[in-house]
Image (cartoon, rainbow, N blue to C red):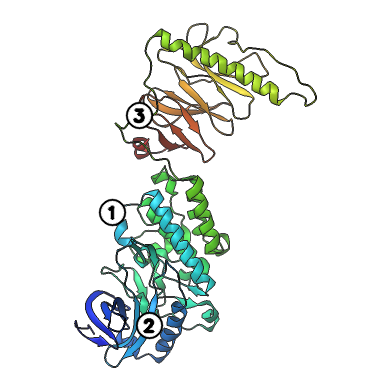
């Protein structure tokens, strides 16, 4: 039954309806004793007549009330009205659900990680208290000014009661707190919202903390990719996808997402519970690590000022580049000789590295082609050079040899740089950022770069580069991307 404005449930005066779902109705109410507004959730009448369900309702309400955490919606009270029946009194949250926010698209990565760490901390608190949420989804995460709040432990079940098999009917607090509940919400034998259910839940097995972690992985995926991890036109097709398929890696649709984050999400959604994170605390630590070392680079909008200098014009300006390149070759030689010296011998070394036979360094352009680059392992140098016929390309020379090897397919390439494992060389050619394996193989296009002016390749397999003269820095995964990724470069 619907409650009219002004109806009183004990000390709680109904002010307005907030939402309704298969498991009850939710109202904004006023606590007349403490003078504060609260959310009241009323148990449906058909469940109120079920003695077994009412016992579980009271038992699980006590479990939820033990969760005192800044990112968990607080349960204030539980009561029974002679007409309305059983009800819960919850903290009234002002804001929007994550589900509402996701209608506008995926979240910025910094915001995503902040929300993720808050919810992971909330899950850790609940799990340590022996409570499994069992219905973690965007609609049960409220975004407020104080941060994210995990709410509606509607399907929560104390771990100590798992073996007792207390039935599968959800608790009252599973009622939707906003209108528009998911069409695939089930209140029968399948307990939970199917798009976020773990494989073991779909198979009818008992849910534990790792089931929450699976659901949380699906939520993380949706926040990053803007689409659900598991989709289908029916419950059966969604369930089949959860049981048999792995979602497409986030990096394919969002190339700026760190590889470390992709791995975190994949581990959360492992089909086998033993292969997931075994506790929310460890998951939270991984998310914190990603936030500290793996957050995407902020790309400067087109037109904003940049620290990159404008390309100089004319021979007098190009001569310093040539000198700097030769100087770098000499400095690299000195560095390698110094690192390899016997510890007991100390003597000065004077040397220089000249262009290999029949080659000339192409350090002057036009335009400027970039300086030679020493491989991270200190064994090889890559540089632009002209052969005897004047054809320009990239060449690789081991520092312990006088011969150099041409990298086929790098004609008129500029600004070479190395991968962190010294296996690949990145470069710019024909308005594109490319890479090539120095051991052999064709050059591969990574993304568009109209007039690239240098790059660096980090250990997360991400390339940071300057796509044009005077512009900002951009970021792209070394594996390359689709046209969307290229446009973001």
Would you name the residue on which mark 3 appears? 471
**Of the residues under marks 2 and 1, which one precedes in the sequence?**
2
Extreme right residue here? Answer: 344
**Of the residues under marks 1 and 3, which one precedes in the sequence?**
1
Q: Looking at the rendering, which quadrant does residue 51 occupy? A: bottom left
What number is the disc on residue 77? 2
Q: Looking at the rendering, which quadrant does residue 220 occupy? A: bottom left
Q: Mark 2 against mark 3, which lies toward the viewer? A: 2
Q: Mark 1 against mark 3, which lies toward the viewer? A: 3
| Residue 385 visible somewhere in the drawing | no
Q: Position of residue 26 (x, y in %)?
A: 28, 77
Q: Position of residue 240 (x, y in %)?
A: 43, 62
Is residue 358 depicted above or below 132 in this figure? above
Is residue 232 depicted above or below 472 in this figure? below
> SS at mark 1?
loop
Q: Nearer the viewer, residue 193 or 310?
A: 310
Q: Position of residue 3 (x, y in %)?
A: 22, 83
Q: Quadrant of the C terminus?
A: top left
Label 1, label 3: how far apart the Cα atoms are:
29 Å
Would you name the residue on which mark 1 appears? 104
- Left or right: where 25 falls relative to 378: left
Label 1 crowd bin: few (<14), some (14–19), many (20+), radius 10 Å: few
């Amino acid at each position: 039954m619907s409650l009219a404005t002004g109806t009183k449930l004990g000390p709680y005066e109904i002010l307005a309806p907030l939402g309704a779902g298969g498991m009850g109705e939710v109202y904004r109410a006023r606590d007349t004793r403490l003078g504060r507004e609260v959310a009241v959730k009323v148990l449906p009448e058909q469940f109120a007549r079920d003695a077994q369900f009412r016992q579980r309702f009271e038992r699980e309400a006590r479990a939820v009330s033990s969760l005192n955490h800044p990112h968990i919606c607080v349960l204030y009270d539980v009561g029974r009205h002679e007409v309305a029946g059983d009800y819960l009194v919850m903290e009234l949250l002002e804001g929007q659900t994550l589900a509402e926010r996701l209608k506008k698209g995926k979240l910025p990565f910094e915001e995503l990680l902040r929300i993720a760490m808050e919810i992971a901390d909330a899950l850790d608190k609940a799990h340590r208290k022996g409570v499994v949420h069992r219905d973690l989804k965007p609609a049960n995460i409220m975004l407020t000014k104080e941060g994210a709040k995990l709410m509606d432990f509607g399907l929560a079940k104390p771990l100590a009661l798992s073996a007792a098999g207390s039935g599968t009917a959800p608790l009252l607090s599973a009622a939707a707190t906003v209108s528009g509940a998911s069409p695939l919400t089930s209140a029968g034998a399948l307990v939970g919202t199917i798009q976020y259910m773990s494989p073991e839940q779909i198979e009818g097995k008992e849910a534990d903390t790792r089931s929450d972690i699976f659901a949380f992985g699906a939520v993380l995926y949706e926040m990053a990719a803007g689409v659900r991890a598991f989709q289908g036109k029916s419950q059966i097709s969604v369930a089949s996808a959860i049981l048999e398929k792995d979602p497409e890696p986030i990096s394919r649709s969002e190339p700026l997402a760190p590889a470390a984050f992709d791995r975190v999400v994949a581990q959360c959604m492992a089909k086998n519970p033993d292969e997931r994170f075994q506790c929310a605390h460890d998951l939270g630590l991984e998310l914190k690590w990603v936030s500290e070392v793996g957050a995407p680079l902020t790309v400067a909008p087109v037109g904003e000022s940049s620290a990159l200098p404008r390309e100089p014009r004319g021979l007098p300006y190009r001569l310093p580049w040539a000198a700097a390149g030769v100087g770098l070759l000499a400095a690299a030689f000195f560095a390698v000789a110094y690192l390899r010296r016997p510890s007991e011998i100390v003597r000065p070394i004077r040397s220089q590295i000249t262009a290999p036979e029949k080659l000339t360094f192409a350090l002057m352009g036009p335009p400027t082609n970039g300086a030679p680059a020493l491989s991270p392992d200190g064994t090889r140098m890559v540089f632009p050079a002209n052969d005897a016929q004047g054809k320009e390309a990239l060449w690789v020379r081991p520092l312990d040899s006088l011969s150099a090897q041409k990298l086929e397919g790098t004609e008129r390439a500029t600004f070479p740089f190395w991968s962190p494992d010294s296996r690949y060389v990145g470069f710019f050619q024909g308005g594109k950022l490319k890479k090539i394996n120095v051991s052999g193989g064709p050059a591969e296009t990574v993304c568009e770069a109209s007039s690239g002016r240098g790059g660096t390749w980090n250990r997360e397999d991400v390339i940071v580069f300057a796509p044009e003269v005077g512009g900002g820095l951009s970021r792209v995964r070394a594996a390359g991307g689709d046209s969307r990724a290229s446009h973001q470069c």
